Image: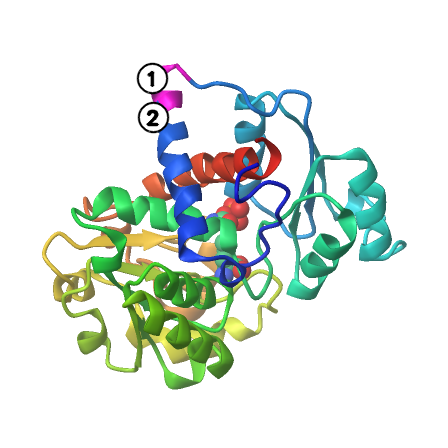
Amino acid sequence: MGTWTGKSFVKVIDHSPEDLMVLLERSTALKAQKRAGTEQQHLVGKNIALLFEKTSTRTRAAFEVAAYDQGAHVTYMDPSGSQMGHKESIADTARVIGRMYDAIQYRGSTQENVETLAASAGVPVYNGLTNEWHPTQMLGDFLTMSEHAPKPLNEVSFAFVGDGRFNMGRSLTVMGALMGCDVRMVGPSALMPPAEVVDAARAIAATTGGTVALTEDLDAGVAGADFVHTDVWVSMGEPKEVWAERAEELGDYRVTSAVMGLAGPGAKFMHCLPAFHDANTTVGAEIAAATGYEDGLEVSHDVFESAASVVFDQAENRMHTIKALMVETLSG
Ligand code: CP
Ligand code: NVA
């Protein structure tokens, strides 16, 4: 039995740095094995339920490809394809799905839902994003940083620039602390992660050698950082009406080439994606017209397309890390 066997993964703060490192190391191994054509299947005969109450490209694709590579089967259910939440409670759904499947991925609104699923299902539950946390994204992000930094993660510094109140800002604060990083949360003070998250991250950082700084000062926050992260200004589930207000609040915190120039030598740009870096999508065009930012919102197009941008490595790593999570929790 491994340390992860049978466990759920609903938020990173539930797990020790050592256990999280087990997943990152397994991810590296599985990635190398896939590249070399030597991957062994550990999940033959397993069935994984993928419950999505919000849309997804990367997370769904990562779970599906990882499962197929490992010999498992998946069932994808979107809100119109299940009774969950509207006709049947989350707890009842969990008990039904848990009788048929070996693990459940859930993406939805509240963290309470995924915690209820995990408490009731009797099989591992993976949080594929809630309003509050995005733990599988953290595995992909920290694998990517470990690949692109010529030093251990506990010597890495990164700045998150933008709205820190949502899943990405909160998760990076805590995961950075767990990994012993120099974490800088940069943005308007009203958009910082909640105090309880910052306090918890600082308590963890005190034991890992990390630091967690909050600052409105963009120049100071980004100065010398190895990585600059950002996220969309408006998250899934938020009403369209908040765009104008958010653009006003975050207009000074766009990640442009000038901002990247403040970061350390060789600094890399990261984004969980999808990103609004041009006006070439329906929503991107609407928002560009409304806000006047034609060359990208949270990140400028030139930074997104620059050699410093590792966003597609980051996206690919979702698959290798989610595979490691399923292998570690469902085999051995
Ligand atoms: N980063 C991420 O979770 O992407 P999707 O919304 O496409 O799954
Ligand atoms: N904060 C974003 C992350 C998307 C992966 C959202 O919740 O929409």
Q: Which of 110 and 332 is in front in this view?
A: 332
Quarter of the N terminus within the rendering:
top right
Give the left or right position of residue 249, taking residue 209 as reference.
Answer: right
Residue 92, compared with residue 241, is above or below; it is above
The boundaries of the magenta stretch are: 33-38
Give the left or right position of residue 219, taking residue 94 as reference.
Answer: left
Question: Residue 37 magenta-drawn?
Answer: yes
- Which residue lies most toward the right here? 87
Q: Residue 36 carries which label?
A: 1
Q: Residue at x 13, y 61 (%)?
A: 264
Q: Residue at x 43, y 77 (%)?
A: 198
**Numbered disc 1: secondary structure:** helix
Q: Residue at x 45, y 57 (%)?
A: 16
Residue 37, compared with residue 196, is above or below; it is above
Quarter of the C terminus within the rendering:
top right
Question: Residue 161 magenta-drawn?
Answer: no
Q: Which mark is residue 45?
A: none
Amino acid found under the numbered disc labelled 2: Ala
Q: Which mark is residue 32?
A: 2
